[in-house]
Image (cartoon, rainbow, N blue to C red):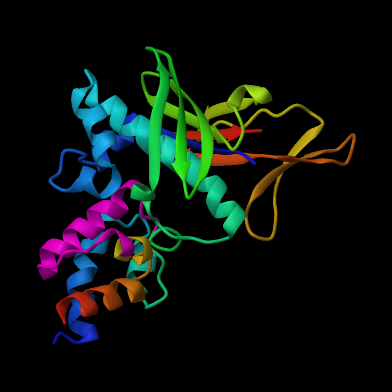
Amino acid sequence: MIGNDIVDLNISRQESNWQRKGWMQKIFSAEEQAVIYLSADQEKMVWLFWSMKEAAYKIFNRNSGKICYAPDSLHCTIDKISQEEALGKVLHKGIVYHTHSVFETDYIHTVAKPEAVNDKINITLIRKVNEPIKLPAHLTLNKDNLGIPYLLDINSGHSIDASLSHHGSYTALVY
Amino acid sequence: MMTQEEIIEKLKPILATYSKDKEALENLNMDSNFIKDLKVNSANLVDIVLDVEEAFDIEIDNDSMEQMLTVGAAIKIVQSKLQ
């Protein structure tokens, strides 16, 4: 199982005012808010935590088939952070999801997995919405009856777990 | 007590601010899903909750927010808080 989320920072700047009164309190725990307030780049921390929650939540929604919206029930911690990337964990209903996030000028992208992110190397393809995703020739992207994406390996006939996300100008596929 | 219609009339302009699907907005019904039908960006769901709190002068707790994903659910929550 895998989940991913991309935040197009040009769009988040246009469409979301994270400084709006009450906004952070609805989404982030007191601990997360403290980390954000103490950060030199608060905007980056807001969207880092947001993308971690969304990426982890996608796995939960998929497993439970349940759709609800409770960003405050997911608790983020950061293990390691640099200018380029962050490793962290999201705790949700007793399950730990491991996250790996990448910071680019125009977007933040997070991959979440129920096991340590390094256990298996995943492939991430990020493109602008109007460009096609370039998959290897033996893989095709499909969706099941529930609309959940997966890749089919035409050589072996095996299906491969995949996660798609869109925001603004970006689409990200992880498998 | 506000009627369902009165609540919908107050909800409409709020949803219009964040919906990217104007046709779905025209055809608003109880089952209209904020994300799937109205194509609201998930980060803006919080703005809808905050706008609804302001418009109706109520406080929406996180348990209610979890459920507030359709027009019908939003009406139910507003009605229960107004009681």
- State the image coordinates of residue B39 (x, y, percent, origin top left): 40, 56
Residue at x-position 33% and y-position 48%: A72
Please tell me which residue lies in front, A140 or A82. Answer: A82
Q: If the image is split into quadrants, where does the N terminus of chain A sit?
A: top right
In the orientation shown, which residue stands out farthest toward the front? A94
Image position of B23 with respect to A174: above or below: below
Which of the 4 image quadrants contains residue A79? top left
Residue A98 appears in the figure = yes
Which of the 4 image quadrants contains residue B8? bottom left
Q: Determine whether, in the image, residue A24 is placed left or right of residue B20.
A: left
Image position of B57 with respect to A77: above or below: below
Residue at x-position 20% and y-position 23%: A38
Query: Secondary structure of the magenta portion, mostly?
Result: helix
Is residue B77 found inside the magenta-colored segment of the image? no
Image position of A171 with respect to B68: above or below: above
Q: If the image is split into quadrants, where does the C terminus of chain A sit?
A: top right
Q: Determine whether, in the image, residue A118 is placed left or right of residue B44.
A: right
Is residue B55 found inside the magenta-colored segment of the image? yes
Please tell me which residue lies in front, A25 or B74. Answer: A25
- State the image coordinates of residue B33 (x, y, percent, origin top left): 41, 66
Please tell me which residue lies in front, B63 or A49. Answer: B63
- State the image coordinates of residue B16 (x, y, percent, origin top left): 25, 61
- State the image coordinates of residue B57 (x, y, percent, origin top left): 9, 67
Residue A130 appears in the figure = no
Image position of B54 with respect to A154: above or below: below
Magenta-tinted stretch: B39-63
Residue at x-position 86% and y-position 38%: A154
Residue at x-position 29% and y-position 42%: A28
Q: Determine whether, in the image, residue A107 is placed left or right of residue A42.
A: right
